[in-house]
Image (cartoon, rainbow, N blue to C red):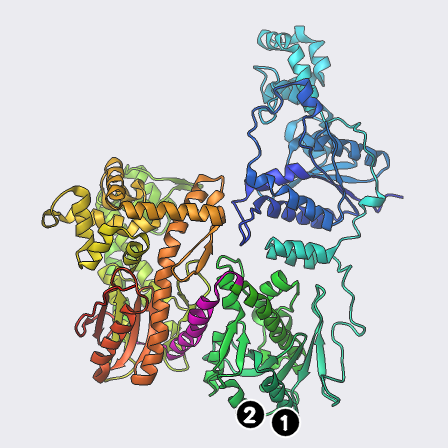
């Protein structure tokens, strides 16, 4: 009768506590702590996947004393109170159980273990196979032939299942002997005393021979004197410890199999809850593992042929049926000129359109247009195929000619997800879209810049509860992957139509959130205009002189050979310089140099360890030089030529607007923001970056100390503001104030220390790091930081206020209201909390700097197009902009660039910009007169 049953009993409290201590602090974008909730849910799903139960019950502790506390006042007395960020998560754990229709058993006076023991016993008597899921090994005493225990070890996915044989293998004892074992050895976690002097090995040996406490005490005369004395003197304590550690199995509760059947999962409610908690990966697991009990299929399956779309014609439609209760997208395939005119009319009437492209590549320079999807209202879309290998479709030139007025109209607003890509693709096909009004990826990023994923599918699931078709379902993966043009038109239409439809739905939701958070100006005035700026920069690309890199590669190869030879000569033998173990053996065993931290395989030889040893031995300096050369050669000198586009022979990076929590842009494929600036060898790599043609120059404009200036403006510190206003050497001024000397008497070392602190203060520099970077002692570093805080009291007050603001509101912001959540500010982990405090201080400054240069880029893009159309903006590297300019325009462009950059945002201190130009990015000289614009309110 019960052979097909499998009962899973869950120790709710044990799993929650295990998750809380196993995972780092996590929180939602609103600041709700979630690490224990996430870990619990993850373990629960893992257990369901592993055990495949037919019935599930969860037991929980009650927040009242148990019979054990009454029997022994010191029971668990040493345990600290439950942290507040854990207490609030128990409500969510119960919600998860409720949405999965998992009954929760709890009873005053008993622990969850006791309920599990009772329920397991009742199940065993009814021959129902049972698995107890817990993070507590106490449950192993319940193991039998039909009751097994699955324990979670170090992490939330690291599990071990115990049957009687596994218990004997671990303890050398049978499960029913474990309470006696605890009576002897005690349990420090529960404050159970046990018997002093009886350790684990002794306890196991005694129980193996005498089976239990009764047998042991009946044969005390056979035991060694020391053991006998300890047992005789602690008889009562031994038996009391056993009873404290024994799980009772007669709690007045009844196993109800009818109400614990795992068949009535409220899948939609569960996904809604996981979406609210921002557990995207768990949502995907639920979709993969759980039958969709609450999803009603369409009459003809997932694809339904319909015959009408808003009018009485015989238009062809396909329907994509996402889950989660959202109406399916009805997509009309545009195959004829009449269909195209109908779509254009619909867009003109609506005055807006969600727009998406389907192509053959993620690289817009090489992507061929396969089709376009358009949506103007929820639940409906159009798909225009233009590049499929097979199927009826209109010619691409005809479609582009008809759509050009629509796409290039400023008055028809375009909504998209990652519009930068779609814009670039269309530009490559001869159409320059205008009226880019709303990018859902950028909007979601502003609302939550620390979100795990901003993909359309992730947002569809987390915001709308819609499960979208993965692109790999269409084109496959790995070696078998095909391009989109080889997929049939109807299949792509369903996929693309849903993309446009969901993008439009997300816009409606995100517009409200932007408005509520007062982010609309930042979104409309900076992030959206920047889309076309970055796309144009990416499409332009930067030219590379491969001969420069080839020469450098040859020189580096020769130098590496020389360094290798010298290293081997000093060592006295050849070895693998890149082997951590072999290098550690040489440095720390043979040469007896001071060791750093240890790794699992031996001594660490990373750069931080070796930098501390620099100067201690000649070979250390050579190894560091060797490593630097290897990195520069492999990462840049040899790699950059392979990244040149076959389309135009230039390097085209991808500028990412949504990858940092501070608002800074990042660069990838390749990362041109990481081109070295420190070290002469690294800087020389910039010689390879050259203008696009003879008669042109590269021009670079760099903000000077912009973050320090923003710090001065935001803190209002009078001394720091005056230093910048008076155009003093701020590092010399800091050294003079802190060391109490005249500016002209400041030594180079004093200025160097002051410079490290000035730049490090906004990143939370401490005495350890200051000492490491300057070579002074830790006590001297502490004294300097204390003196700095006293000298710049306004800066200290600003930093304190940012910490308090982050703690009070759960976020900090830039001068233009760019926000960053700071949920970890309340973390119980000191390291995590301190990191959150550093972020709370740094983000408003670094984020404001990012906003300033973005404003400058937008204005320069427009001004250059109007006044110097042959000048092109190529790169943004943090505080620097790089341009490709005709030689005849270098002077006026330099003047324009400086004027725009220093006036991008008015502060209480002046912004300064240094402009240089030259035949490459390395050989540059200052251009034009310096312009400094005084601050005004």
Residue under numbered circle 2: 402
Disc 2, disc 1: CB below 8 Å? yes
Q: Is residue 482 visible?
A: yes
Q: Is residue 517 magenta?
A: yes
Report x, y in % for residue 581. 38, 44
Question: Which quarter of the figure is the N terminus placed in?
Answer: top right
In this view, 394 is above or below 906: below
Alpha-carbon neighbours of circle 1 within 10 Å: few (<14), some, or many (≥20)?
some
**What's the residue at 30%, 84% (across, down)?**
867
Q: Quick check: can you spot residue 366?
A: no
Identified at 79% across, 28% down, the residue is 251
Measured from the top left, where is residue 156 in percent x and y?
Answer: 60, 44
**Which of the two residues, 323 or 892, is positioned nearer the viewer here?**
892
Q: Rate crowding at label 2 as few (under 14), some (14 to 19) or many (20 or more) other CA atoms within 10 Å.
A: some
Query: In the rendered view, would you say 919 is above or below 683?
Result: below
In what element is the residue under mark 1?
helix
Q: Which residues are magenta?
A: 516-545
Main SS, magenta residues: helix
Image point (63%, 74%), residue name = 501
Q: Quadrant of residue 347?
A: bottom right
Does the magenta run of residues contain 925?
no
Q: Nearer the viewer, residue 27 or 4?
A: 27
Can you identify the residue that label 1 sits on?
A: 337
């Amino acid at each position: 009768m019960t052979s097909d049953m499998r009962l899973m009993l869950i120790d709710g409290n044990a799993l929650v506590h295990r998750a809380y201590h196993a995972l780092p602090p996590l929180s939602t974008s609103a600041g709700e702590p979630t690490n224990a909730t996430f870990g619990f849910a993850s373990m629960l799903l893992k257990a369901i996947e592993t055990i495949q139960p037919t019935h599930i019950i969860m037991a929980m502790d009650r927040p009242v004393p148990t019979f054990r506390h009454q029997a022994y006042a010191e029971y668990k007395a040493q345990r600290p109170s439950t942290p507040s960020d854990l207490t609030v998560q128990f409500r969510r754990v119960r919600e998860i159980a409720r949405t999965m229709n998992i009954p929760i058993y709890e009873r005053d006076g008993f622990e969850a273990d006791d309920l599990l023991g009772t329920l397991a016993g009742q199940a065993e008597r009814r021959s129902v196979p049972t698995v107890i899921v817990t993070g507590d090994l106490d449950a192993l005493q319940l193991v039998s032939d039909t009751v097994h225990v699955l324990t979670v070890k170090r992490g939330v996915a690291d599990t071990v299942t115990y049957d009687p044989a596994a218990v004997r293998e671990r303890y050398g004892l049978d499960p029913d002997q474990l309470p006696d074992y605890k009576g002897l050895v005690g349990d420090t976690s529960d404050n159970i005393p046990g018997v002093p002097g009886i350790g684990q090995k002794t306890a196991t040996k005694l129980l193996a021979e005498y089976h239990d406490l009764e047998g042991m005490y009946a044969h005390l005369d056979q035991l060694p004197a020391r053991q006998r004395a300890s047992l005789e003197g602690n008889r009562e304590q031994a038996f009391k410890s056993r009873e404290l550690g024994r799980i009772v199995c007669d709690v007045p509760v009844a196993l109800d199999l009818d109400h614990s059947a795992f068949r009535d999962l409220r899948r939609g409610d569960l996904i809604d809850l996981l979406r609210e908690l921002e557990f995207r990966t768990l949502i995907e697991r639920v979709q993969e593992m759980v039958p969709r009990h609450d999803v009603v299929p369409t009459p003809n399956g997932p694809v339904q042929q319909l015959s009408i779309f808003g009018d009485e014609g015989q238009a062809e439609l396909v329907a994509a049926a996402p889950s989660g209760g959202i109406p399916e997208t009805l997509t009309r395939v545009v195959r004829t000129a009449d269909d195209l005119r109908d779509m254009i009319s619909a867009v003109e009437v609506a005055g807006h359109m969600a727009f998406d492209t389907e192509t053959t590549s993620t690289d817009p320079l090489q992507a061929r247009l396969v089709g376009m999807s358009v949506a103007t209202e929820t639940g409906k879309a159009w798909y225009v195929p233009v590049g499929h290998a097979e199927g009826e479709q209109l010619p691409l030139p005809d479609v582009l000619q008809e759509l050009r007025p629509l796409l290039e109209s400023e008055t028809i607003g375009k909504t998209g997800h990652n519009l930068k890509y779609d814009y670039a693709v269309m530009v490559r096909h001869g159409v320059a879209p205008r009226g880019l009004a709303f990018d859902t990826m950028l909007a979601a990023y502003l609302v939550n810049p620390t979100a795990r994923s901003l993909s359309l599918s992730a947002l569809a699931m987390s915001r709308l509860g819609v499960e979208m078709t993965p692109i790999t379902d269409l084109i496959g993966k790995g070696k078998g992957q095909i391009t989109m043009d080889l997929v049939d038109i109807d299949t792509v239409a369903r996929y693309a139509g849903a993309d446009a439809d969901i993008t439009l739905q997300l816009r409606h939701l995100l517009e409200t959130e932007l408005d509520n958070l007062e982010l609309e100006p930042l979104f409309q005035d900076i992030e959206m205009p920047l889309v076309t700026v970055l796309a144009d920069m990416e499409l332009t690309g930067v030219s590379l002189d491969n001969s420069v890199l080839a020469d450098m590669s040859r020189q580096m190869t020769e130098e590496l050979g020389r360094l290798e030879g010298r290293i081997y000569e000093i060592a006295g033998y050849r070895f693998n310089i890149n082997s951590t173990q072999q290098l550690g053996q040489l440095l720390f065993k043979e040469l007896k140099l001071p060791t750093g931290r240890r790794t699992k395989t031996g001594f660490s030889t990373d750069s931080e360890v070796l930098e501390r040893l620099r100067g201690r031995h000649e070979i250390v300096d050579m190894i560091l030089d060797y490593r630097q050369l290897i990195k520069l050669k492999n990462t840049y000198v040899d790699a950059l030529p392979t990244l040149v586009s076959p389309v135009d022979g230039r390097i085209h990076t991808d500028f990412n607007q949504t990858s940092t929590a501070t608002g800074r842009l990042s660069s990838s494929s390749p990362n041109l923001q990481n081109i070295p600036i420190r070290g002469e060898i690294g800087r020389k790599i910039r010689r390879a970056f050259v203008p696009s043609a003879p008669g042109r120059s590269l021009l670079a404009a760099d903000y000077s100390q912009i973050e320090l200036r923003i710090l001065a403006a935001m803190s209002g510190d009078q001394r720091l503001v005056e230093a910048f206003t008076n155009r003093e050497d701020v590092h010399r001024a800091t050294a003079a104030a802190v060391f109490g000397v005249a500016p002209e008497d400041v030594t180079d070392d004093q200025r160097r220390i002051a410079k490290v602190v000035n730049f490090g203060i906004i990143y939370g520099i401490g005495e350890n790091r200051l000492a490491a970077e300057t070579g002074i002692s830790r006590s001297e570093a502490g004294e300097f930081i204390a003196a700095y805080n006293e000298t710049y009291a306004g800066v200290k007050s600003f930093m304190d206020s940012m910490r308090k603001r982050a703690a009070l509101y759960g976020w900090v912001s830039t001068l233009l209201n760019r926000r960053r959540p700071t949920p970890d500010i309340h973390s119980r982990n000191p390291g995590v909390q301190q990191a959150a405090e550093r972020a709370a201080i740094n983000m408003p400054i670094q984020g404001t700097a990012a906003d300033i240069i973005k404003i400058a880029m937008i204005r320069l893009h427009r001004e250059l197009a109007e006044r110097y159309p042959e000048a092109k903006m190529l790169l943004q590297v943090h505080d620097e902009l790089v341009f490709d300019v005709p030689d005849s325009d270098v002077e006026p462009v330099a003047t324009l660039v400086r004027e725009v950059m220093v006036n991008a945002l008015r502060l209480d201190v002046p912004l300064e910009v240094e402009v240089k130009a030259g035949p490459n990015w390395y050989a540059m000289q200052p251009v034009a007169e310096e312009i400094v614009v005084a601050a005004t309110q």
